[in-house]
Image: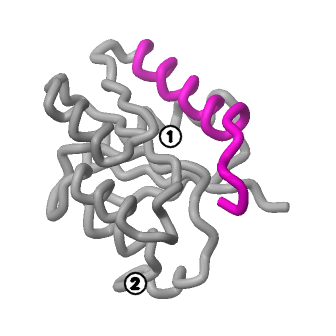
Amino acid sequence: MKAKSILLVEDNPQDELLILRALKKVSLANEVEVVRDGQQAIDHLFGVGEFAARANAELPAVVLLDIGLPRISGLEVLARLRADERTRLLPVVMLTSSDEERDRLKSYEEGANSFVRKPLDFAEFAETVARLGIYWLATNQPPPSA
């Protein structure tokens, strides 16, 4: 059985590289698919637009979603995921640089499963991402038929 993938929605190339390295370091066998803006995230998850070939593809095990994205914000992506029956239970972790209390509150109001601030320290950031990967892919039990 193929391991479920992770969808990383991140527009910062340095953060993307660090996240990918941290997940690889903990030896998770899961594929990490990367999109760089909110519109790509929606298209990828719903199999439309440039991702039409994914129309019947399995959803990822978890979405790591930044808030400050081009085109469509992470909060709007989250709202659209929760509004659709196909993705309303999909685990979404807001992984963001935002330290704004309103962003954290809005994330939870829109149905985020977790809100994680990206640490500024390189080693701490890598450790945080590694723990996220282990938890959501190895420890967490997803809802039935998700």
Q: Quadrant of the N terminus?
A: bottom right
Q: Which residue is mark 1?
A: 20
Magenta residues, start to end: 123-146
Helix, strand or loop at mark 1: helix
- Residue type at mark 2 is Val
Q: Which residue is mark 2?
A: 48
Residue 61, image x, y percentages: 61, 52
Residue 137, image x, y percentages: 66, 40
Name which residue lies at 22% across and 57% down: 76
When asked about the image quadrant of residue 44, the answer is: bottom left
Residue 119, image x, y percentages: 32, 18
Q: On the picture, is 144 further left or further right than 82?
A: right
Name which residue lies at 55% across and 51% down: 6
In the image, residue 125 sits, relative to residue 29, either above or below, namely above
Please tell me whether mark 2 or mark 1 is closer to you in this view: 2
Dot 2 and dot 1 residues touching (CB under 8 Å): no
Name which residue lies at 23% across and 44% down: 67
Q: Between 107 and 73, which is closer to the camera in this rendering?
A: 107
Q: Quadrant of the C terminus?
A: bottom right
In the image, residue 127 sits, relative to residue 40, either above or below, namely above
- Residue type at mark 1 is Leu
When asked about the image quadrant of residue 43, the answer is: bottom left
